Amino acid sequence: MLGSATLAPAFADTPAAWPAEPHVSGWDYIVVLLLIPLGVFVLVWLAVTIPAFRRSHGQASGEPWGDRREWFGGPRRGVDSADDVTPEALEASEHGTGGASGRW
């Protein structure tokens, strides 16, 4: 008896006072589930990329690559100063530091 009482709401029908559900065509289904999210994606993508395209000057043909090397946490005088460090100075600076050579 208890089992049939808990299953009864699963077989309930729509109340007669409610209006009939409108028919949803396949085209409406595709528009709502595919084209609208795709359109939002394209609008966001354009909003992000158009300013970047306007700002970008690009690399002119024949110009040398003008990158600036960056080493985060590296020597304070720049990347080129790393070649000036002697092995003795490097070992002296590693004493008492953590990382792979850390000790307990």
Image (cartoon, rainbow, N blue to C red):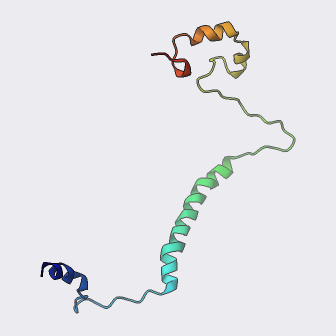
Name which residue lies at 70% across and 46% down.
56
| In this rendering, position of residue 57 left or right of residue 17 | right
Which residue lies most toward the right here?
Answer: 62
Q: Nearer the viewer, residue 36 or 57?
A: 36
Query: Tag count in the figure?
Result: 0
Quadrant in which residue 64 is drawn: top right
Instruction: Please identify the quadrant where the N terminus is shown.
Output: bottom left
- Vertical position of residue 77 compared to residue 13: above or below: above
- Vertical position of residue 51 compared to residue 86: above or below: below
| In this rendering, position of residue 42 left or right of residue 7 | right
Relative image position of residue 93 (x, y in whole percent): 59, 10
Relative image position of residue 65 (x, y in whole percent): 79, 36
Instruction: Please identify the quadrant where the C terminus is shown.
Output: top left
Q: Nearer the viewer, residue 53 or 12?
A: 12
Name which residue lies at 70% across and 16% down.
81
Relative image position of residue 88 (x, y in whole percent): 67, 7
Quadrant in which residue 101 is drawn: top right
